[in-house]
Amino acid sequence: NAGVTQTPKFQVLKTGQSMTLQCAQDMNHNSMYWYRQDPGMGLRLIYYSASEGTTDKGEVPNGYNVSRLNKREFSLRLESAAPSQTSVYFCASSESLLGYNEQFFGPGTRLTVL
Amino acid sequence: AQSVTQPDIHITVSEGASLELRCNYSYGATPYLFWYVQSPGQGLQLLLKYFSGDTLVQGIKGFEAEFKRSQSSFNLRKPSVHWSDAAEYFCAVGNQGGKLIFGQGTELSVKP
């Protein structure tokens, strides 16, 4: 099992460009998440999906959109990238939204916006 | 509001020495508590978690943590640190809605 996979691993964008970060999990999990990691701030939740067909905003959703394509895949889109979106992005999944469920993380996408 | 504080941004210990990483949380109900480790350039891996029962929990790689409700703490410990333990460590609290609130992280360096 690959667990949680993310593509691409690295990306450099110019201000105003758009891109989509892809995430897939093979653990048959219901819930999926997108986080961003910035130095000294830990991980902050951007969007999450409780189950296939649903998505909700997290702590820092501005400038992002998401799509839960099916049970396996959850993508994050930047429509018009800004330098403030330079960060490391992590996708995660869990069996459900119940608070005691472990979240499994992908390896991350390092994004630089110039 | 729920929050997690890791007071130490960076800690350096000698190989073979003991380790304690501090974590304090603010949460109204009984918390679900987690410790994750992130090796350089990698994703996060769960070390251990607490949600009920025995307040001393054992995790992978020889780590343990103790939940102290009276102090709102969930400190991570290891009796003897190995060079491969150098990484960033995150404490997190999980709420009823399944979202994780992370602390700022503690970077651990290990001296030979």
Image (cartoon, coloured by chain):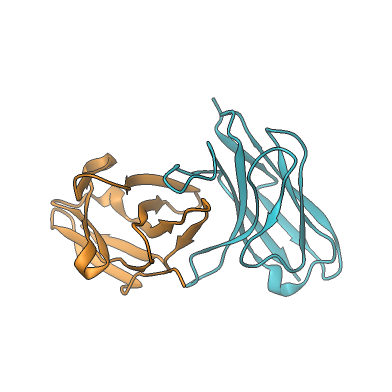
Identity of the residue drawn at 47% across and 62% down = B101
Residue A14 position, x and y percent, is: 82, 67
The orange one among the chains is B
The cyan one among the chains is A
Residue A45 position, x and y percent, is: 59, 60
In the figure, is residue B81 to the left or right of B60?
Answer: left
Quarter of the rendering containing residue A16: bottom right
Identity of the residue drawn at 59% across and 50% down = A108
Residue in front for this viewpoint, B86 or A18: A18
In the figure, is residue B21 to the left or right of B30?
Answer: left
Residue B38 position, x and y percent, is: 42, 52
Residue in front for this viewpoint, A105 or B2: B2
- Where does the C terminus of chain A fall, quadrant-wise? bottom right
In the figure, is residue A38 to the left or right of B17?
Answer: right
- Where does the N terminus of chain A fall, quadrant-wise? top right
Residue in front for this viewpoint, B1 or A93: B1
